[in-house]
């Protein structure tokens, strides 16, 4: 299945997030705020915070459309935009190289298992590269389970990175090999 993937606008993003704002009112703000800010803002507060990011400039990710329906989202931005990553004991940078992060996917349930997440990831590589990135990292779930609750899969699955040779392969990154995977996008 082929999708039209383009830089996110507020209307497309809000459509993908739905009434509940993605995962229970997150509005894709989890990595961008402290835990206390995130919990305090669940719902309307997180929606307003994300809408403010869209108002400041280009949307912080990409939206996939099927016909004219927004059906998928990937958040991609410089790692420095995600304060929770800076505070994480597990997901510390492995070197001083500036990287971009793919922190969140949300796929309309009618379009899951269609290859959309891999297409979004490929598009995120190009999106980040066009903005000067030469390394992209993600924090996928690595599970042997055939089915996995979608509510816990918002960072994507480890298998989607190497599927189809996304951006030339996805070797694990440093000590966080069980949690982070990096993609060198400088030469793609």
Image (cartoon, rainbow, N blue to C red):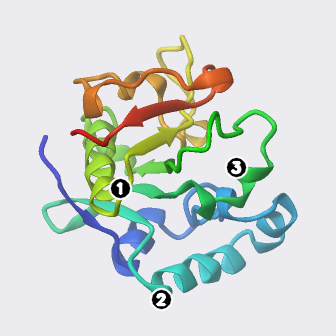
Pointers 3 and 1 in contact (C-beta within 8 Å) = no
Q: Which residue lies furthest to the top in this view?
A: 144
Label 3 vs 1, first from the N-terminus: 3
Q: Quadrant of the C terminus?
A: top left
Q: Which mark is residue 55?
A: 2
Percent of width and height locating residue 41: 76, 73
Residue, disc 3: 85
Secondary element under disc 1, as helix, strand or loop, is helix
Give the mark, 2 or 1, whose residue is nearer the N terminus: 2
Place residue 7 in its image quadrant. bottom left
Quadrant of the snapshot with the N terminus: top left
Label 2 or label 3, whichever comes before in sequence order: 2
The residue at which mark 1 appears reads as 128
37 sits left or right of 123 in the view: right
**Frontmost residue, 185 versus 59:** 185
Tell which of 91 and 156 is nearer to you: 91
Disc on res. 63: none
Q: Which residue is at a point 39% across and 53% down the rendered structure image?
A: 133
Q: Count neighbours of disc 3 (C-alpha within 10 A) and say few if under 14, some if 14 to 19, many if 20 or more.
A: many
Above or below, 144 against 100 in this view is: above
């Amino acid at each position: 299945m082929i999708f039209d993937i383009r830089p996110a606008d507020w209307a497309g993003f809000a459509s993908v997030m739905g009434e509940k704002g993605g995962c229970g009112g997150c509005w894709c703000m989890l990595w961008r705020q402290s835990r206390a800010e995130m919990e305090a803002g669940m719902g309307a507060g997180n929606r307003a915070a994300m809408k403010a990011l869209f108002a400041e400039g280009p949307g912080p990710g990409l939206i996939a459309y099927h016909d004219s329906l927004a059906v998928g989202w990937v958040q991609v931005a410089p790692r420095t935009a995600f304060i929770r990553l800076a505070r994480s004991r597990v997901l510390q940078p492995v070197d001083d190289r500036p990287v971009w992060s793919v922190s969140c996917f949300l796929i309309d349930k009618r379009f899951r298992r269609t290859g959309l997440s891999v297409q979004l990831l490929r598009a995120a590589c190009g999106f980040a590269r066009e903005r000067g990135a030469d390394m992209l990292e993600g924090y996928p779930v690595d599970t042997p389970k055939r089915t996995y609750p979608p509510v816990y899969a918002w960072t994507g699955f480890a298998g989607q990175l190497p599927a189809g040779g996304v951006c030339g392969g996805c070797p694990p990154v440093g000590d966080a090999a069980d949690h982070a995977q990096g993609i060198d996008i400088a030469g793609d």
